Amino acid sequence: MTAYALIGHMGPADQPADLIGRWQAQFPVDLLSGNQTLGYGMGLVVRNLGKLGIYPSEVGVDVLVLAAMVHAADTRINRVQTSQDAWTRELGICVPVSDPELWTGQCAPLEKILRFLTGDRWTVSFRARPEGMADFVRRPVADLHDHGFDGVALFSGGLDSLVGAIDRLQQGSFPLFVSHGGDGAISKPQKDLFLDVAAAYGNGNREPRRVRLGMSFTDKITPGVGREESTRGRSFLFIALAAMAGSGWRGTFRSKSRRTA
């Protein structure tokens, strides 16, 4: 079995050390966009949440960055090419976070969760964000009006999440819907379906709202390694997006969905 690792960094000046271990290759993944904000759709989601009066915590942002690294490894390391049994991969990720001490204590359960989801062997490690990257969320000086949402619901565009959305809205709930769409083939039907839901359950005072994470990774981050199409870890990205949004709640929040795919 050959082992591959992805090392997250933030900008060209951030040069983390390689991971220790038996790695066939280690690939750097720059998590920032050209304007020094979070890339791969993460910064846009944070800004769109702010427009709705939701301001995630920095640990909440860490959750999404972690999920981005998981998604990159899961979709950019081909099973047939890199595993002995055409399925089980050996994957490593190193994630820059706001509180590495907090996150390092979660390595073991995270590795167990990811192995259950994907069938692979994972090594998860954390490092501190570089200097100047402590705050990715611009919070207002004073609290704005209450955003009015009573929970978070996953909206994939599939039948199960559609039924879950209708159930919640029929019951009078007002959740914030979150979606992931990595390519146009998924994004447009997902958008069209949500517009139908919003039209059916909106009224003059309030209309269902959704934030969408458009995240995909190209072959540039793992040169010489084929793409993987199984995406078994996509549910982790969905849950992380909901958790990140929920970290901006002033009180408790609920995340409900029948399924994520």
Image: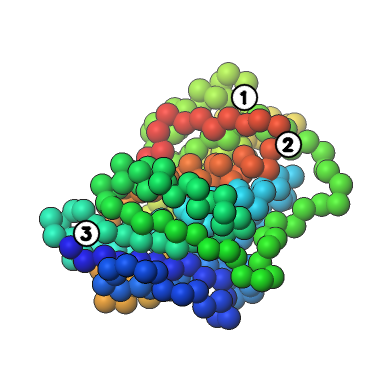
Residue on which disc 3 sits: 79
Which mark is first along the chain, 2 or 3?
3
Q: Is residue 69 visible?
A: no
Location of residue 26 with respect to 255 vertically, above or below = below
Residue on which disc 2 sits: 250
Element on which disc 2 rests: loop
Q: Which mark is residue 173?
A: 1
Residues at marks 1 and 3, CA–CA distance in whole angstroms:
41 Å
The residue under the point 41% across, 56% down is 124
Residues at marks 2 and 1, CA–CA distance in whole angstroms:
18 Å
Question: In the rendered view, how is the structure colored?
Answer: rainbow
Q: Quadrant of the C terminus?
A: top left
Element on which disc 1 rests: loop
Q: Residues within 10 Å of mark 2 (few under 14, many from 20)?
A: few
Residues at marks 3 and 2, CA–CA distance in whole angstroms:
42 Å
Which mark is first along the chain, 3 or 1?
3
